[in-house]
Amino acid sequence: MEKPLVILEMANNHMGDKSHAIKIIKTYSKITKNFSNKIDFAFKFQFRDLETYIHHSFKNTNHKQVRRFEDTKLTDKQWKEIFKSAGKNFKLISTAFDEKSVIKIVKLKFDFLKIASCSMNEWPLLEYISKFARKKKIICSLGGANENEIRNTTSFFKNRNINVKYLYCVAKYPTKPENLNLSYFSHLRNIYGDLISGFSSHELPEEKLSGGAAYAAGSRIFEKHVGLETKKYKLNKYSTSPKQMQYWIENLSNTIDRFGTIKDRNKFLYKERENLSVFKKGIFLKKN
């Protein structure tokens, strides 16, 4: 049976600091190695070609999101060192927010290309991905999408014979437990089957149960924002600390054990029948 995949999303939590990024990777590799026998892990990054992604009239302004991207910019050399560190223990995945980033992911031979929720109906970008990254393993989040939009996006890739795995996602940063609505994951599975493969989370960092609940509903891909708080850097409201991630993975691992497999159940069946035999009514002959 294929192991579930947990994606650790670094996003901008590297803070534009190569050493901090590598420290995050090394910290989480110590946690994940204890579960690698039953779970695959990937580290995810985000690529934006800032020269073209940010309109010239917004560059070097105090716009919140623009500052966030410009202040955390890394050089290609720094990225290379980060990828080398992550590649030792993790699969590599990156979100492409523009066409140049698609080519970058393909050239770097990442294991997966990610389509963000905000890009799931950005048709020029999807067209570009379908032409230049069709051989990549592609994962697409569906946060904020209505059923019409989900139908359009899944049809777009299906009609081009491109195998994309979709993640149910709640685009609320952070998401309270009562707003996870994992029942909608099951609803999408009833419509699209295994195409709906996972659950992308922006939940409160202290959340522990969502991974196990989503696994029981059929999720086999999970995405969690992770970071590392230091005296210099603070975590945002939807990124987990190493200790919180440890608890979350432990709960997922315990659910995997308890959920088991059909094959293992059938292997154990003989023992069940043996145990039940002592409770069955006996048969006695009235005559010898």
Image (spheres, grey):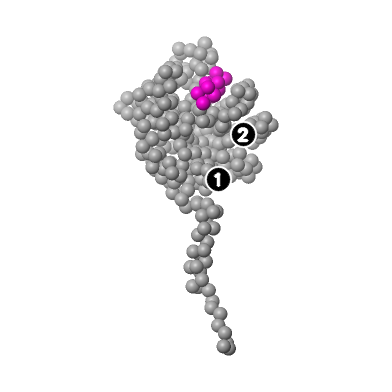
Looking at the rendering, which quadrant does residue 159 occupy?
top right
Where does residue 259 sit, x and y in percent of width and height? 50, 51
Residue type pointed to by label 2 = Asn
Q: Is residue 219 left or right of residue 249?
A: right
Calculate the distance from the C-alpha at mark 1 to the C-alpha at mark 2.
18 Å
Question: Which residue is more in the foreground, 172 or 227?
Answer: 227
Give x and y (percent) for residue 249.
42, 42
SS state under label 2: loop
Residue at the far right: name it. 159
* Label at residue 218: 1
- Mostly what secondary structure, the magenta segment? helix
Residue 26, x across and y down, in percent: 36, 32
* Nearer to us: label 1 or label 2: 2
Q: Residue at x 46, y 13 (%)?
A: 61
Kindly state the secondary structure of the residue where label 1 is placed. loop
142 or 159: nearer the viewer: 159
What residue did someone put label 2 on?
163
Residue stretch in magenta:
96-109
